[in-house]
Amino acid sequence: MPVHNIEPVYDRNSKILILGSFPSVKSREMRFFYGHPQNRFWKITSAIFNEETPETIKDKKAFLLRNNIALWDVIESCDITGSADSSIRNIKVNDINKILKKSKIEKIFVNGKTAEKLYKKYLEEKTGIKAIVLPSSSPANAAYSLDKLIKEWAIIRE
């Protein structure tokens, strides 16, 4: 059973929390979020904040914290085939409240429909915060161009 091996990124100034479902195989290998080169998360968020796309893990963490973004996933561990969200079974969720207690989170966003479904099922009642759904940054979400994703994700800056 794959276990989430990436610590959440946040600090006491974090105002928004973005949650994915569970890290891809590539992200687990790299030990950091959105590690697959085709995932558009870093291009989307850097465009919204008018910054260069961060390349290293150190730069990505600095980018998130500089923009008051906390980043984690709904799932701590699960059974999953490869990186396919549709194959997720036997879920254990992360304790999101540990971030909420030590930060200034005002809004929670979920990256894609699977994260939304899991958040509503396992975490919404515990946090008392309704999540705002963003279209998935995954390369599997071919219906959305990068420009369309940037427009939809711009809400995180409001």
Image (cartoon, rainbow, N blue to C red):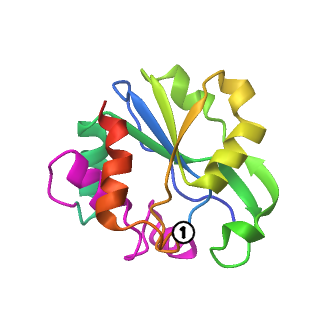
Which residue is pictured at 23% across the width and 53% down the height? 46
- Secondary-structure class at tag 1: helix
Visible residue check, residue 121: yes
Q: Considering the image in quadrants, where does the C terminus appear?
A: top left
Q: What is the x, y in percent for residue 74?
A: 64, 47
Disc 1 target residue: 28
- Determine which quarter of the picture holds residue 105: top left
Magenta region, residue range: 24-53
Q: What is the x, y in percent for residue 101?
A: 54, 20
Which residue is pictured at 66% across the width and 36% down the height? 95
Q: Say whether residue 1 is magenta.
A: no
Q: Say whether residue 35 is magenta.
A: yes
Disc 1 marks a residue whose amino acid type is Arg
Visible residue check, residue 8: no
Q: Is residue 2 left or right of residue 28?
A: right
The crowding category of the residue bearing disc 1, from other C-alpha atoms within 10 Å (few below 14, some 14 to 19, many at least 20), is: many
Q: Looking at the image, is 8 positioned above or below residue 35? A: above
Which residue is pictured at 76% across the width and 71% down the height? 87
Q: Is residue 80 left or right of residue 34?
A: right
Q: What is the x, y in percent for residue 1?
A: 77, 68
The total of numbered circles placed on residues is 1
Q: What is the x, y in percent for residue 64?
A: 31, 44
